[in-house]
Image (tube, coloured by chain):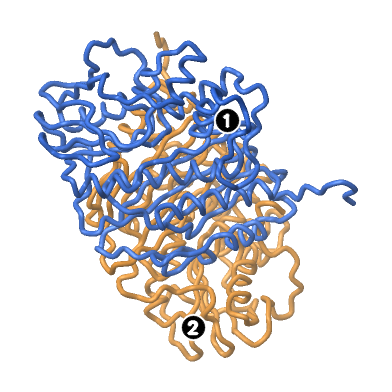
Chain colours: A orange, B blue
Amino acid sequence: MCVRRCVITVGDLGEFGAVSRISGRLPQGATVLLGPGDDAAMVRAPDGRVVVSTDLLLEGRHFRRDWSSGYDVGRKAAAQNLADVAAMGAVPTSIVVGLGMPADLPVEWLDALADGFRDECAVVGASVVGGDIARGDLVVIGVTALGDLGGRAPVTRSGARPGQVVAVAGRLGYAAAGLALLESGWPPAHPPEPSRAPLSLPSSPLREAPLWEAVAAHRRPCPPYAAGPQGADLGASAMLDVSDGLLQDLGHIAAASGVRIELDPAAFVVGEPVAAAAERLGADPLDWVLSGGEDHALAAVFPAGVALPPPWQIVGDVVAGQGVHVRGREIGHVGWDHFA
Amino acid sequence: MCVRRCVITVGDLGEFGAVSRISGRLPQGATVLLGPGDDAAMVRAPDGRVVVSTDLLLEGRHFRRDWSSGYDVGRKAAAQNLADVAAMGAVPTSIVVGLGMPADLPVEWLDALADGFRDECAVVGASVVGGDIARGDLVVIGVTALGDLGGRAPVTRSGARPGQVVAVAGRLGYAAAGLALLESGWPPAHPPEPSRAPLSLPSSPLREAPLWEAVAAHRRPCPPYAAGPQGADLGASAMLDVSDGLLQDLGHIAAASGVRIELDPAAFVVGEPVAAAAERLGADPLDWVLSGGEDHALAAVFPAGVALPPPWQIVGDVVAGQGVHVRGREIGHVGWDHFA
């Protein structure tokens, strides 16, 4: 008997109760021919091809439940996969989700997670079409996203050629700045926003607003999805999403294309949250811009002389050679390796 | 310095070394337009639709490294997803794999896992087209399979109607019998087969061969993939793969279709490995046949009077009502619930 407040857990619901509860929160869009509830889902692939990408997120490694709410984690897990699909020049159509979780996980957390998946998918018109649930000691999330190229050629990593320009779309360094703040113990009390509403910033001294924005960016990335197909239509010959850090990820384009990439440090706009966090922590903001992951910006290579509309912004050149270089700057740490 | 034998670990390779090593072991088939190495892969979806299913496997929950080799786990993880696709009436085209693993995991285990994925996919002509690697304390495997219906309508769980017959294709009870043997401590020394060759049975008394076969079935299921599209072509109006136990899984068809399913216990052929394990452990073999999961047999409902070729075998009827019943038998445990 609950005298004060019952916390209903996933264990109370059971596997099929949990599946049913999640499914009930997930609307199905026009690309979905068969949604959750069967052995498999079925999704439209209008041009006879399907783009597919998968990522695995582990509690304690990719997120912490005391730093991010279930809703945050759902949005972030969906975002990083949807961004991979966009980085091919495709429009995401759907995701499927494999979920491992402890029996004592509050159902409220699970609900919020599902809502996070739903809302991030809604940004691009995609749907959560299926999944799988298992019991584990920690929360484990496997997301696979599908997408449609609408007849476009996929933009891979190997199409960069000397003479072209390098451009980025979206935030850089925000999530890294937010993570650094959380790791530094700022703010002193920083429970994740329990509600599923848009992140509201606590009333705080005005100068702290950019710091809260950095923390919010760590919790929920904001990838420039539309810039993916847009970049493909603008003639991008190589593209990827920045998940591990710009220098490291551009390194994949340089290696796959057999070219050298030279970045102009003065071409980067350092966001106010990045600058504010750097000032507070005594860090170099450009380190986060160049090496911070998890914002899921897009980086691409375009023909010289291209006129790029926003959000694209030219930050460097492709030349003969190899590797990624920042003019006038020694490069130390370049990005994230799970086993480094 | 290694005096006797170096065990190279995943941590030695690093994230990108491990990805590159795995990718090198994975041939790409004709349905693959773009394989591993980019933000996303691209696969043919010839009829403009794609079937998608996902599963999560957790070490200690779905497999034990002392009971199954990396190769076994790869085959099993692939098989259970490919079977889900087949159960829609589709032919699998590809899988993507998310892998969490500890840094001290021997590379040999990872190689064998990749080979297991490769070889199980080869059974149906599918390819491993992409994946993701992360560091975790235990091995975690998220698999997503895609498939092509070749113009067929998907066979869902809701199409059963009174007057139809219920049929199964593939093994039932084998994996459960094998698991029960392992749990009982049989055989006294039972390391998983380290090689990637077909499972060889140790030279042992002839009467033990069926027991080894049951253990092998636990380690590597053998789903009747071709029976999926075949069942669809034969007019199956509902179909699924038996992953949690026949009674429980048929319960999903009964519930989704609003019918009652009556099984004839005399219609089931009890495999020799199941019978032998039951005799050794003093168990009722039909319990495993009716309630054991993980063989990934297919179960389907067909119009009355249908002539079913092998491997399909009629085992019951669809009538008005609800639930799943076995004539002349009380039903206790029906199958697997991760949170029960």
**Image height of A259 relative to A1, above or below:** below
- Chain bearing tag 2 is A
From this viewpoint, is residue B185 visible? yes
**Image height of B108 relative to B158, above or below:** below
Residue in the foreground of this view, choosing between A268 and A54: A54
**Residue drawn at (52%, 48%), measured in percent from left and top?**
A56
Residue A291 percent coordinates (x, y): 65, 64
CB atoms of marks 2 and 1 within 8 Å: no
- In what element is the residue under mark 1? loop
Which quarter of the rendered picture does the N terminus of chain A lie within? top left
Residue in the foreground of this view, choosing between B265 and A92: B265
**Image height of A127 relative to A230, above or below:** above
Res A302 label: 2
Tell me which amino acid carries mark 1: Gly
Q: In the displayed structure, does residue B306 sit left or right of residue B243? A: left
Tell me which amino acid carries mark 2: Phe
**Image height of A162 relative to B225, above or below:** below
Residue A93 percent coordinates (x, y): 32, 58
